Image (cartoon, coloured by chain):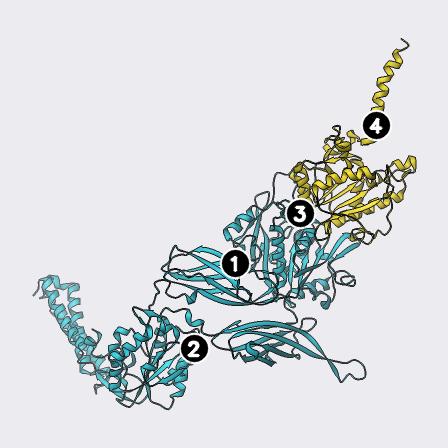
Chain colours: A yellow, B cyan
């Protein structure tokens, strides 16, 4: 009987450990809240739909335990981050966007109806050839993709592995402060690394080996930015935790200005 | 037969005056006719009782009528009816015989050229019979009349025929000669567009009748002739242009023919467009529009041709030439947008590939922020929408997106009107949540500027439901007026183009633009989810400029939802925006009546000169610098046109065939400020370039069928007669009756006409025959 407690605790500990590990890798997905937003948001005719990209996650280069449905890496911080961003968009611009949040899936041509899409945890994304072609066409026809929330060398490599399926020959460039995208709505002359909410407990602005923020982009033939890349940063958390007294305002403020500039740029260029 | 019955030629009756030569007054004749009628009536009535019963009704009236007519006719003959007419005195008058000597007379028909047939006709007795009563003078006629000694001097190689001018010149040159009549042998293929009123007046002033003799088939048996090709005389570089080709054919109904447009000013005469079409019924005009890219800047000479068909009688009329002046100055459009929206982005994206159209824009990104794009210097549009004419009028086009009318001050609204009306700019209004009626434009001072009468109510703007969930959509389709429009041409073939419009992805939103005004053209419609058909694209000319409404802000789906590489969206917007600005004039706008001078170098240059605010500048100094072929050059000063402020004209003549480049410059003296204000500096207002071309001998290849209508009209208007060659044996008989030259007044009796005796006999015989029929003889 003395062994009953340890024996029964072992599987519980194991389950707890696995859960914590999964949460570390995938983050807290808040499924209940997602379904609330997702299911109770009948679309309202809008000029702009905040659209998050849904894709199949495949952790660490093809492990089979990534997945596509809610709870996949694509839905990290959804919907609160998106919702807070949408509120800022409505308050601070004249962009018509009354519709609730929107999720677009690369497995459908409806992605073409939303010239702006936001994707996170793109170090985990994988595409079929059909999906890669759809995203390729989407971008070259005039669509805009903002990617966020991936950190360090490995994440970058995994992100680029997917990107090379989409735009094989397009160079990635570092954006300079004077680039138009940082002046289209707000003049953003000073940028710094925007950390995730981990910063609240650790004080660290970086994760993994992503010590330096990378403001990068991929352009089309006319120089228009098609893909805006926020690497070694987590703007989604900065929006999500903007109302937290522990999360510094300066990070959220910059994150909001960045995304509003990106959206305005997408709608003007 | 006519002369057998009437004794004299038809022209005697046409030109002579009727007279009664009897010495008794005419009223006596009338009285006697009435007396005869009354007497016969009394006589018949008095004997009616004894007559057979069947004669007591209407039959007695018939007998009375016949007898009265007989009596009246006999009485008229007693008054000696006659015709008085002027007649040429024998051997004292000259008959001018004119033979068309132009190239069209060299066309061979039935084994001989038209001119050879004319010569043969003259030699086969016509000249001889004329010479018996008159002197004759031979002339050949092309651009001018020239006297010839013999018919052997004719050579049908002249590149032009100007019948009217030649006759006028002949009349003037022979004013001291007794010309009794003119005989013109021609196919009527006149290149001057008809006989001028001046020429007719000159002939009528001398009472010279022109007898015309028509040669040549009135209908070709096997021929295709290009009738016209309409091409815009000006274009922006890299523009897509339309050549509207019209032709007529005979003898090839149902056959196929290749139409081509070539740029013959390019080294290899590059083919710009080609199409095979099926020929319609004989004689019908057919039209086809060929679309092509005009290419880079410069003067372009286009050759529009129909490939010759086997057995064609005349292949020289299968080609037309047109001149297009392709400008290199980029056009600028000011685009004002009231909110960030996708339409704005995708319109700008479509224009990225068009180097000739630049968009400077103001986008209201937040309540208090405006984003400027495409500006040429930091000061441009720094204060928002311009408030001064010189700031707005630097643009050639203006797009107003989803912006409320109230955003513009009354002064700015008036400026927008002036931009279109006076400056000649293009205004495009887009649909949107703050646009058209929903933006209060229906109550603005610019309602008359709109191509539609906007709805009086608001809530006319509707967005598509979330496309993923929506089941009803707004689609576009081509309207009839859009079939030939360069704006809406996505595919060259008209039928394929109409089908292409139906396959365009649905629109993301639409706005009811109201009812098109008279004079407006609806180029495309849209079908709303409720099934209503509303105008989508409406255009109209207003004042010096043009306005249009594109009643949606959701055409961007044509780009995003079409396959990658599909050009429909970009092509449509590029063509629409080029239409918006292409015809917007500069400060100097030069023009000529026709860019192609056929056989005649005379040309009138016109320039419309405006100052910096586009008001007429009548005090400008305007000059035309002309450069032509083989070193031809001229500096022509243009003079103001009375009662047309700002308009200047100059007449000039192009001496040689070839292309001419003309640059018109306008300058104005501006008084100096300060102490030396009595002096001034010369400031250039602007300049414009135009091209024209002189071509000789081309017009003669067209309209080679006998123009009988022209010859008949010429004869009728001068008192002459149209003759077929086969009837010319009677010409000598008709010629003498003329009021021109040395004449005498002749009186010709009519009482002894064979017709009179026939009528007398007929009247008596009719009465006899009727009585026999009625059984009372």
- Quick check: B376 left or right of B506? right
SS at mark 1 in the image = strand
Is mark 3 in CB contact (under 8 Å) with mark 4?
Answer: no
Residue under label 2, please give it: B196
Q: Nearer the viewer, residue B68 or A187?
A: A187
Distance CA(mark 4)–CA(mark 1): 68 Å
Residue A28 visible within the image? no
- Asked whether the residues under marks 1 and 2 belong to the same chain, the reply is yes
- Name the one closer to the observer, A17 or B331: A17
- Residue projecting furthest to the front: B268
Which mark, by number, is residue A85?
Answer: none
Foreground mark, 4 or 2, reads 4
Mark 3, Cα crowd under 10 Å, few <14 / some 14-19 / many 20+, is many
- Would you say B293 lies left or right of A82 here? left
Q: Relative to residue A82, is residue A2 depicted above or below?
A: above
Q: Nearer the viewer, residue A243 or B503?
A: B503
According to the image, label 3 marks what residue? Answer: A141
For label 1, the residue is B273
Which label sits in the foreground, 3 or 1? Answer: 1
User: Residue B133: where, in percent of width, then height?
Assistant: 25, 86
SS at mark 4 in the image: helix
From the image, state whether disc 1 or disc 2 is nearer to you. 1
Calculate the distance from the C-alpha at mark 3 to the C-alpha at mark 4: 40 Å
Query: Where's residue B238, x and y in %?
Result: 61, 61
């Amino acid at each position: 009987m003395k062994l009953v407690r340890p024996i029964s605790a072992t599987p519980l500990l194991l389950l707890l450990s696995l859960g914590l590990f999964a949460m570390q890798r995938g983050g807290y997905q808040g499924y209940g809240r997602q379904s609330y937003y997702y299911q109770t948001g009948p679309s309202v005719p809008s000029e702009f739909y905040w659209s998050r990209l849904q894709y199949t996650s495949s952790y660490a280069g093809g492990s089979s335990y990534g997945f596509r449905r809610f709870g996949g890496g694509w839905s990290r911080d959804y919907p609160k981050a998106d919702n807070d961003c949408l509120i800022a968009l409505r308050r601070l611009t004249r962009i018509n966007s009354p519709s609730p949040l929107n999720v677009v899936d690369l497995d459908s041509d409806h992605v073409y109806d939303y010239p702006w899409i936001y994707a996170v945890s793109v170090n985990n994304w994988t595409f079929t050839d059909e999906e890669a072609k759809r995203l390729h066409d989407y971008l070259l026809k005039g669509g805009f993709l903002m990617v966020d929330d991936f950190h360090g060398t490995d994440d970058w490599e995994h992100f680029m592995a997917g990107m090379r399926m989409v735009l094989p020959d397009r160079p990635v460039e570092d954006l300079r402060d004077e680039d138009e995208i940082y002046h289209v709505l707000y003049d953003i002359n000073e940028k710094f690394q925007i950390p995730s909410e981990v910063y609240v407990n650790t004080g660290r602005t970086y994760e993994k080996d992503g010590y330096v923020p990378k403001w990068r982009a991929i352009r089309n033939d006319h120089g228009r930015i098609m893909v805006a890349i926020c690497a070694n940063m987590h703007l989604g958390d900065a929006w999500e935790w903007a109302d937290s007294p522990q999360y510094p305002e300066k990070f959220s403020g910059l994150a909001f200005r960045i995304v509003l500039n990106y959206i305005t740029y997408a709608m003007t260029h | 037969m006519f002369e057998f019955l009437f004794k004299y030629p038809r022209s005697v009756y046409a030109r002579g005056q009727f007279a009664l030569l009897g010495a008794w007054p005419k009223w006596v004749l009338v009285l006697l006719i009435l007396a005869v009628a009354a007497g016969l009536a009394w006589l018949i009535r008095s004997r009616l009782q004894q007559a057979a019963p069947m004669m007591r009704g209407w039959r007695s009236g018939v007998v009375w009528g016949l007898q009265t007519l007989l009596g009246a006719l006999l009485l008229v003959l007693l008054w000696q009816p006659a015709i008085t007419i002027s007649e040429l005195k024998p051997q004292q008058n000259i008959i001018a015989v004119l033979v068309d000597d132009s190239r069209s007379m060299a066309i061979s028909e039935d084994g001989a050229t038209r001119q050879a047939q004319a010569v043969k006709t003259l030699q086969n007795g016509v000249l001889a019979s004329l010479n018996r009563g008159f002197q004759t003078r031979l002339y050949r006629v092309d651009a001018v009349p020239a006297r010839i000694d013999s018919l052997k001097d004719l050579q049908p190689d002249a590149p032009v025929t100007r019948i009217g001018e030649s006759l006028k010149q002949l009349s003037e040159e022979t004013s001291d000669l007794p010309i009794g009549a003119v005989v013109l042998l021609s196919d009527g293929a006149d290149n001057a567009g008809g006989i001028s009123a001046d020429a007719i007046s000159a002939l009528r002033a001398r009472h010279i009748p022109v007898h015309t003799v028509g040669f040549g088939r009135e209908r070709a048996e096997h021929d295709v002739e290009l009738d016209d090709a309409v091409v815009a005389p000006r274009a922006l570089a890299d523009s897509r242009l339309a050549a509207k080709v019209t032709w007529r054919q005979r003898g090839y109904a149902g056959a196929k023919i290749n139409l081509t447009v070539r740029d013959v000013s390019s080294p290899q005469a590059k083919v710009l467009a080609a199409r095979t079409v099926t020929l319609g019924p004989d004689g019908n005009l057919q039209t086809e529009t060929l679309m092509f890219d005009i290419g880079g800047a410069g003067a372009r000479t286009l050759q529009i041709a129909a490939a010759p068909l086997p057995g064609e009688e005349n292949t020289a009329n299968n080609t037309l030439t047109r001149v297009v002046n392709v400008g290199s100055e980029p056009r600028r459009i000011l685009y004002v947008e009231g909110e960030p929206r996708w339409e704005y982005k995708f319109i700008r994206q479509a224009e990225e590939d068009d180097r000739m159209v630049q968009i400077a824009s103001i986008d209201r990104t937040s309540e208090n922020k405006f984003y400027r794009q495409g500006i040429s210097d930091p000061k441009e549009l720094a204060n928002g929408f311009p408030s001064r004419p010189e700031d707005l009028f630097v643009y050639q086009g203006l797009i107003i997106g989803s912006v409320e009318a109230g955003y513009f001050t009354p002064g700015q609204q008036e400026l927008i009107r002036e931009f279109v009306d006076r400056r000649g700019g293009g205004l495009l209004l887009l649909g949107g949540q703050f646009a058209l009626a929903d933006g209060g434009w229906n109550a603005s001072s610019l309602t008359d500027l709109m191509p539609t009468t906007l709805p009086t109510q608001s809530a006319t703007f509707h967005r598509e439901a979330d496309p993923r969930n929506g089941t009803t959509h707004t689609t576009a389709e081509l309207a009839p007026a859009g079939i030939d429009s360069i704006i809406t041409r996505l595919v060259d073939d008209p039928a394929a183009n109409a089908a292409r419009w139906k396959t365009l992805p649905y629109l993301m939103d639409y706005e009811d633009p109201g009812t098109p005004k008279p004079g407006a053209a609806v180029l495309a419609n849209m079908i709303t989810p409720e099934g209503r058909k509303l105008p989508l694209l409406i255009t109209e000319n207003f004042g010096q400029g043009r306005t249009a409404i594109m009643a949606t802000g959701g055409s961007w789906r044509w780009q995003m939802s079409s396959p990658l590489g599909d050009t429909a969206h970009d092509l449509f917007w590029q063509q629409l925006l080029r239409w918006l600005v292409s015809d917007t004039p500069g400060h100097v706008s030069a023009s000529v009546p026709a860019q192609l001078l056929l056989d005649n170098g005379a040309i009138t240059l016109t320039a419309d000169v405006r100052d910096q605010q586009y008001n007429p500048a009548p005090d400008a100094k305007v000059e035309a610098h002309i450069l032509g072929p083989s070193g031809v050059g001229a500096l022509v000063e243009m003079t103001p046109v009375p009662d047309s402020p700002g308009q200047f004209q100059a007449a000039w003549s192009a001496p040689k065939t070839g292309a001419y480049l003309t640059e018109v410059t306008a300058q104005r003296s501006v008084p100096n400020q300060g102490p030396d204000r009595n002096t001034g500096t010369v400031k250039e207002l602007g300049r414009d370039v135009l091209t024209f071309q002189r071509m000789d001998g081309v017009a003669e290849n067209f309209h080679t069928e006998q123009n009988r209508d022209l010859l008949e009209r010429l004869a009728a208007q001068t008192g002459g007669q149209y003759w077929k060659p086969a009837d010319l044996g009677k010409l000598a008989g008709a010629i003498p009756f003329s009021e021109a030259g040395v004449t005498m007044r002749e009186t010709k009796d009519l009482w002894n006409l064979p017709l009179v005796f026939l009528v007398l006999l007929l009247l008596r015989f009719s009465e006899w025959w009727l009585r026999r029929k009625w059984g009372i003889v």
